[in-house]
Structure formats: C-alpha cells, structure tokens
C-alpha cells in the first residue's frame, strides 16, 4: 500500500457478522440488550471491523452487505446456496442492527437487492482500483478473482487481528494462473458451499492444469479433441453446467457506485459517536473503541 493514494478498506459485513455470531453463540453467549434482543453478532462485527481499520490504517472505508437470500444467481440456478440452512432466529434481528451500527460509527454501508456483497466489493475494486489502494476484509475465497496491483485481501483467520494476506503476486506464485482465471478454475470444480457442481470428476488439481494449459473455459472447449477420451467425456457430459458454473462464479463488477470518495472518509471516533453507541447499549463496542482510539475521544 502506498502513501500517495487513498486507501479504501472494504468490509464484507455479512462475513464478519456471521463469524462473530457463531464464535459466541456456540457457547450460548448471545449478549441480549435491554429489550432482550441478541447483540453478539453485531458487537463482534463492529469490534472486528474497528480493529481491522486500526491495523490497515485506511483513509476511507465501506461496508458491503448481502440483501436477502435471493440473488440473480438463484434466477440462473435454483440450487445456488440452496444447501444452506436458514439463519438462526437469534441472528435474524442483527442483520438490520449491524447496518445501523455501521452508520452510527460513520461507516458507509452498501447493499443492493438481488446482488451479493461480493458484487459490491468487486464493483468498488472496478471503480477505484488504480486510483486508490484497496484492502478487502472477508473470509470468502471467491474474492481471489479481484486481486490486482494495489488490491489485497485480508482473509479472517484467528480472532480480530490475525489475517491471511493475499496479493496478486502471492496468488500467481501459489496457483500459477492470473487471479481472473480463478473464475475458470471454479467453473470446473464448482463450489460445494454455494451448491453448484461444476464438472463431475474434475478436482482442483486437474482444473488448474487445464486452465494453465488452455487459459479459459472457452480455451478448453476449443481444444477438447486434444484431451484424453475420458476427459472429453466428462466435460461433454457436463458442458452446460460448466458454462453455468462460470457465470455463477464470476463476481459482477459493473454496479453503479455514484458516491464520491469523500463520502467514504472515516470520521474520527469522538465523544458524540461514543455516546451514540453507548446509548444503544453496545458496551463491548465502546470498550474496544476506548482501547483503540481512547486518546482521540473528545468530550461532548
């Protein structure tokens, strides 16, 4: 990351919210507020994002959200994420609460019906890549396709402070293909967690070998006769799903994000913000903020 350019921190809000919820709910810790509504996911999400900002020191920040279970990918394929259970009832009210606390903290939130947080993150990278350095915080490996010079991904690993940091250079070194080709790799392997199969009988190693040799899904199909009879048969049998899986794997990066960079500036955590968070009963967020920004907090 350079000092000359703005540095945007993009937070995968739903990823951090789910991660925080399950980390504490497994022990039965839901942290209900005065109204009896659980806050464990909300408070963990905010503390995690706050700590990430203190580590990566961005100048600007945006939080991206999924907006319901149904997206355009479900219109393409009924089975998309159909294998996932419904969210726990203790988590459901925290979706809106998490967006509200983001706004209280001065972090601009984004969500578009029918799109996923990944698509918003991808559109931010498309819009600001090259003009700003970008750090993405998430646990979703689908985002690897967005890597490019000046854009890095910090995958959550342990607690709020330990990350597995990927740059485009590291990706190329590990995978031997370009980040954008990760889409083609997933077209062959599918994604069990997202519920689409790719090509049956083709695993990650074979998929990588094909992409290294032929570049893209289209390149493999054009060279189909050069492959072994067994491989030809597998691909031919699942060609329709192969092409569909590529559409499902590709992050949509063309969403209109009309906000100026100034609207993403991170406000100083001052006494007024602290008071607003405290009023909502988020004691753990206040405690984390005091620890990270205590010297900057002004009395109101």
Image (cartoon, grey):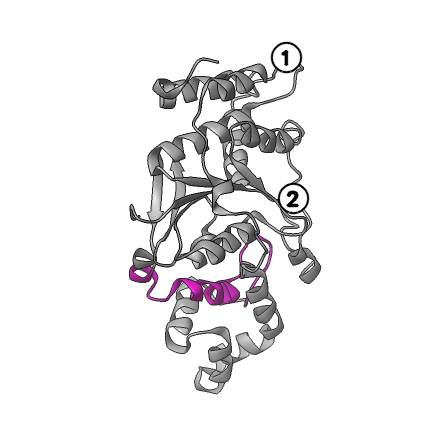
Highlighted magenta segment, given as a residue range: 172-199
Q: In the image, what residue occupies the spot 51% across and 80% down?
A: 221
Circle 1: element type: loop
Determine the image quadrant of residue 291: top left
Give coordinates of residue 211: x percent, y percent: 41, 72
Circle 2: element type: loop
Any mark on residue 167, and which? Answer: none
- 89 to the left or right of 186: right
- 109 to the left or right of 210: right
Q: In the image, what residue occupies the spot 41% across and 78% down?
A: 214
Determine the image quadrant of residue 290: top left
Q: Are marks 1 and 2 in contact (CB under 8 Å)?
A: no
Packing grade of label 2 (10 A; few <14, some 14-19, many >=20) is: some
Give coordinates of residue 93: x percent, y percent: 66, 29
Packing grade of label 1 (10 A; few <14, some 14-19, many >=20) is: few
Is residue 174 within the magenta segment?
yes
Give coordinates of residue 104: x percent, y percent: 55, 27
Can residue 171 be seen?
yes
Is 54 above or below relative to 36? below
Residue identified by numbered label 2: 67
The span from disc 1 to disc 2 (Cα, nearest Å) is 27 Å
Q: In the image, what residue occupies the spot 60% across and 54% down?
A: 195
Is residue 235 within the magenta segment?
no
Q: Nearer the viewer, residue 236 or 298?
A: 298
Any mark on residue 34, and which? Answer: 1
Determine the image quadrant of residue 108: top right
Give coordinates of residue 188: x percent, y percent: 50, 67
Which comes sooner in the sequence, label 1 or label 2? 1
Is 145 above or below relative to 112? below
Q: In the image, what residue occupies the spot 36% across and 32% down?
A: 54
Give the mark count.
Answer: 2
Q: Nearer the viewer, residue 21 or 47?
A: 47
């Amino acid at each position: 990351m350079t000092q000359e350019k703005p540095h945007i921190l993009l937070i995968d809000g739903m990823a951090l919210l789910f991660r925080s919820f399950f980390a504490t709910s497994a022990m039965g810790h839901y942290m209900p507020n005065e109204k009896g509504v659980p806050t464990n996911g909300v408070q963990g999400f905010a503390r995690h994002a706050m700590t990430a900002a203190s580590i990566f020191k961005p100048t600007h920040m945006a939080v991206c959200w999924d907006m319901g279970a149904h997206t355009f990918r479900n219109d393409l394929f009924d089975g998309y994420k159909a294998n996932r259970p419904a969210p726990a009832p203790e988590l459901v009210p925290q979706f809106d609460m998490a967006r509200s606390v983001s706004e209280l903290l001065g972090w601009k939130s984004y969500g578009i019906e029918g799109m996923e947080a990944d698509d918003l993150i991808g559109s931010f990278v498309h819009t600001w890549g090259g003009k700003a350095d970008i750090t993405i915080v998430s646990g979703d490996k689908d985002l690897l396709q967005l890597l490019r010079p000046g854009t890095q991904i910090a995958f959550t690993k342990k607690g709020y402070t330990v990350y597995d940091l990927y740059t485009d250079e590291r990706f190329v070194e590990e995978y031997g293909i370009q980040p954008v080709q990760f889409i083609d790799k997933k077209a062959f392997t599918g994604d069990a967690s997202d519920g689409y199969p790719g090509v049956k009988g083709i695993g990650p190693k074979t998929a990588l070998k094909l992409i290294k040799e032929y570049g893209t899904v289209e390149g493999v199909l054009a060279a189909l006769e050069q492959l072994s009879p067994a491989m030809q048969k597998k691909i031919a049998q699942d060609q329709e799903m192969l092409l569909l899986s590529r559409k499902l794997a590709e992050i949509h990066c063309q969403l209109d994000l009309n906000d100026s960079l100034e609207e993403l500036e991170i406000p100083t955590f001052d006494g007024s913000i602290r008071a607003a968070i405290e009023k909502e009963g988020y004691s753990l967020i206040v405690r984390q903020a005091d620890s990270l920004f205590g010297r900057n907090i002004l009395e109101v």
